[in-house]
């Protein structure tokens, strides 16, 4: 059992938790993930390691409340316990040997982009970050990004905070202003990563994306997280989660990610109803 040491509401749909998991914290690196079960009857879900503290033995996770399991997880409070918390899994992000890198985060994907930006900065790279959200109310981790970025650009779709526009608009402006990047790292919704990759391919900049497809066992056995990269089948859990954005078949990935959308919606509604019943029953 793994104790929730801290819980913070970052915005109406995104929550941050700090979990007591010393064995995971001992080995964790930027770009890796864990798989958890809220309780013994729960499903397994992957969540990226948003931060880690080896001294205190804790792992930070940040998740969006989108389905039944994340709803149940969000119902827990500080002092409660998570049944299973397995990791670190996946390959660590490559963060050494870069002079200047642009990190592009979209929405809750910023929770995945932040530890990579932090690790790049710690390894001597000049880090430029572009963070994109639909509106001001959904902004997360702004101060954390500013602390590890030499240049920080905030954009919102509706212009309610920062610059109005998309992350691709901001990235193009940076490049056209004379910035030269060894690499672009894009993490966020699939459609965002697709269009960042199309732009950087046009600009001739190496691009890495972090893929988070449907995943069950985290060992490559179930095949649920398969992707097509450069015409070959890859598994995000063991071959990734980072891949060359210019080689990923994003259209296939988007089709596969929507397979269980209707089922997830029903399970989420059931979870909400059960939670209401539990509260009413005292």
Image (cartoon, helix red, strand yellow):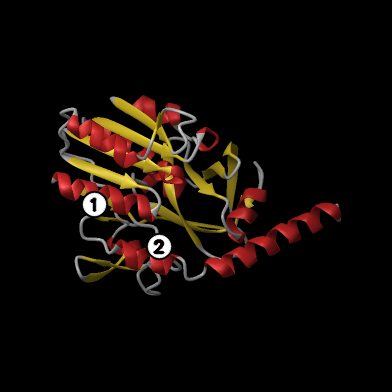
Residue 232 image offset from top left, x and y in percent:
21, 71
Question: As displayed, is residue 194 above or below residue 125?
Answer: below
Report how far apart the C-alphas of labels 1 and 2 lie in the structure.
20 Å
The quarter of the displayed image where residue 169 is located: top left
Helix, strand or loop at mark 2: loop
Can residue 206 be seen here? The reply is: no
Question: Badge 1: few (under 14), some or many (20 or more) residues near its Cα, within 10 Å?
Answer: some
Question: Badge 2: few (under 14), some or many (20 or more) residues near its Cα, within 10 Å?
Answer: many
Outermost residue toward the right in this view: 281
Describe residue 99's horizontal placement relative to residue 85 as left or right: left
Residue 264 image offset from top left, x and y in percent:
57, 65
Question: As displayed, is residue 141 above or below residue 66?
Answer: above
Q: Earlier in the sequence, mark 1 or mark 2?
A: 1
Along the line of sight, which residue is nearer the eye, 242 or 179? 179
- For disc 2, the marked residue is 213
Outermost residue toward the bottom in this view: 222
The circle drawn on residue 198 is 1
Helix, strand or loop at mark 1: helix
Describe residue 74's horizontal placement relative to residue 246 as left or right: right
Quadrant of the frame with the N terminus: bottom right
Looking at the image, which residue is at 53% across and 66% down? 261
Residue 226 image offset from top left, x and y in percent:
34, 69
Along the line of sight, which residue is nearer the eye, 124 or 201? 201
Along the line of sight, which residue is nearer the eye, 231 or 279? 231
Along the line of sight, which residue is nearer the eye, 96 or 3? 96
Disc 1 + disc 2, Cβ < 8 Å: no
The quarter of the displayed image where residue 17 is located: top right
The circle drawn on residue 142 is none
Can residue 1 be seen here? The reply is: yes
Can you tell which of label 1 and label 2 is closer to the viewer? Answer: 1
Looking at the image, which residue is at 35% across and 65% down? 253
The quarter of the displayed image where residue 8 is located: top right
């Amino acid at each position: 059992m793994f104790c929730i040491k801290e819980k913070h509401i970052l915005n109406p749909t995104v929550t941050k938790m700090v979990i007591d998991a010393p064995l995971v914290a001992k080995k964790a690196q930027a770009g890796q993930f864990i798989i958890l079960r809220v309780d013994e009857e729960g499903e397994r879900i992957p969540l990226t390691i948003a931060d880690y503290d080896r001294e205190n033995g804790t792992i930070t996770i940040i998740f969006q409340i989108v389905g039944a399991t994340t709803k149940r997880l969000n119902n827990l409070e500080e002092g409660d316990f998570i049944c299973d918390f397995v990791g670190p899994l996946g390959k660590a992000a490559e963060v050494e040997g870069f002079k200047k890198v642009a990190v592009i985060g979209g929405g809750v994907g910023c929770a995945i982009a932040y530890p990579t930006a932090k690790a790049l900065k710690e390894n001597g790279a000049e880090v430029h970050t572009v963070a994109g959200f639909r509106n001001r109310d959904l902004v997360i981790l702004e101060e954390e990004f500013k602390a590890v970025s030499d240049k920080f650009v905030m954009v919102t779709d509706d212009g309610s905070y920062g610059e109005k526009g998309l992350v691709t608009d901001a990235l193009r402006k940076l490049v056209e202003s004379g910035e030269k990047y060894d690499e672009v790292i894009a993490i966020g919704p699939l459609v965002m990563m697709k269009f960042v990759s199309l732009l950087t391919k046009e600009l001739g900049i190496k691009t890495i994306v972090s893929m988070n497809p449907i995943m069950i066992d985290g060992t490559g056995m179930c095949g649920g997280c398969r992707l097509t990269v450069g015409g070959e089948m890859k598994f995000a859990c063991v071959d990734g989660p980072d891949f060359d954005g210019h080689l990923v078949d994003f259209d296939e990935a988007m089709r596969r990610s929507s397979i269980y959308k209707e089922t997830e919606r029903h399970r989420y509604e059931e979870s909400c109803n059960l939670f209401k019943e539990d509260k009413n029953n005292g």
